[in-house]
Image (cartoon, rainbow, N blue to C red):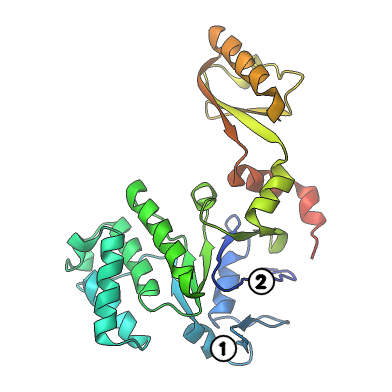
Amino acid sequence: MANDDVSLRVDAGEVFGLFGHNGAGKTTIVNQLLGLLKPDSGSIVIDGKDITKNRNLGRYLCSVQPQSKTPLGELTPRAVTRVMGQMRGISADEVDRRTTELFERLDIMQWADVQGNKLSGGVLRLTGFCMAAVAPGRVVILDEPTNDVDPVRRRFLWSAIRDLTKDGTAVVVVTHSIREAESAVDTMVILNEGKVITQGDVHQIKSETAGNRMKLEAVATAPEDRFVKPAWGESLKVADAKLTLAFERELAAEALKWAAEQRDGGLLAEYSLTEITLEDMYIELVGNKGAVAGVNR
């Protein structure tokens, strides 16, 4: 079952993160919001209107950046953004103002009048965002918005995403890049095999899941069987020459001492202590089959 008894709420003016691995059911939810699919039961209400009764309303109330690249052909980013804005009913002057504002914000003005078949994948992704954001609906759906985008412009993009919410627009971000979305998302849901594992306020979920834990990350110069987990450590993993050791925050000094000893013994290279991230939580929750069986809905 693509979506199994899923119940979600996205409030006006918030950025909502929809997380899950391939096949978890994210795209099915997006297609239902847009009226492309109809649920077997239940309702989908956007701005007080049940779009299961009139699925065309989904495309009217939502603007979307699809996961696939925007095929511009010989059209330019400025041209397609203008067309999208006018199709959504804003004046030509307002379209021009918003287009210029978005292109400057994302630092892609130098490609505004370049044919699409001559543009990089990153610029095409940013153009797709501009097409969704130039005249946003009540909900803006962004499916993997940062794919192919360089690190500098990713920062510009997340800032522009946050700005969309200032007038009460809700933003739904579908992404695998959980680590970079962590600072931009207000609330979240994690899906696994069509079921909701957890949802709610990001900071609250992180606090409840991560607790008072930290982690040691290091470059491993030896295989996993050479390491002995210290008694105070919660878990120790070595994969792709990367060691991760979780522990309680008050044991940070012990963790640094242990890492220095392993480095002196030739088992580790550089290392650092970091907070437990949203991505760590995601991996822990999805990997916990017991959590999937005990979904609270």
From the image, tell me which residue sits under label 2: 9
Q: Nearer the viewer, residue 77 or 249?
A: 249
Which residue is drawn at the image coordinates 23% and 67% (left, top)?
A: 116
Q: Which residue is mark 1?
A: 55
**153 in relation to 240, above or below:** below
Amino acid type assigned to the residue bearing label 1 in the image: Arg
Q: Position of residue 239 (x, y in %)?
A: 57, 30
Evaluate whether residue 96 shows in this view. yes
- Image quadrant in which you'd find residue 93: bottom left
Closer to viewer: mark 1 or mark 2:
2
Name the element at disc 1: loop
Furthest-top residue in this view? 265
Whether residue 42 is situated above or below residue 72 in the rendered picture:
below
Residue type highlighted by circle 2: Arg
Q: Nearer the viewer, residue 155 or 150?
A: 155
* Point 33% across, 80% down: residue: 84
Labels 1 and 2: the sequence-earlier one: 2
Residue situated in front as seen by the camera: 242 or 270: 270
Give how far across and how far down residue 255 sits, in percent: 64, 20
Query: What percent of the width, then of the height, locates residue 200?
Result: 68, 60
Residue at figure coordinates x 24%, y 70% from the top left:
100
Looking at the image, can residue 287 be seen? no
**Circle 2 residues within 10 Å: few <14, some 14–19, many ≥20:** some
Q: Residue furthest front?
A: 166
Percent across and percent down for residue 54 are: 58, 92
The number of callouts visible is 2
Q: Are marks 1 and 2 in contact (CB under 8 Å)?
A: no
- Quarter of the image where the N terminus is located: bottom right
In space, the residues marked 1 and 2 are separated at their CA atoms by: 19 Å
The secondary structure type at the circle numbered 2 is loop
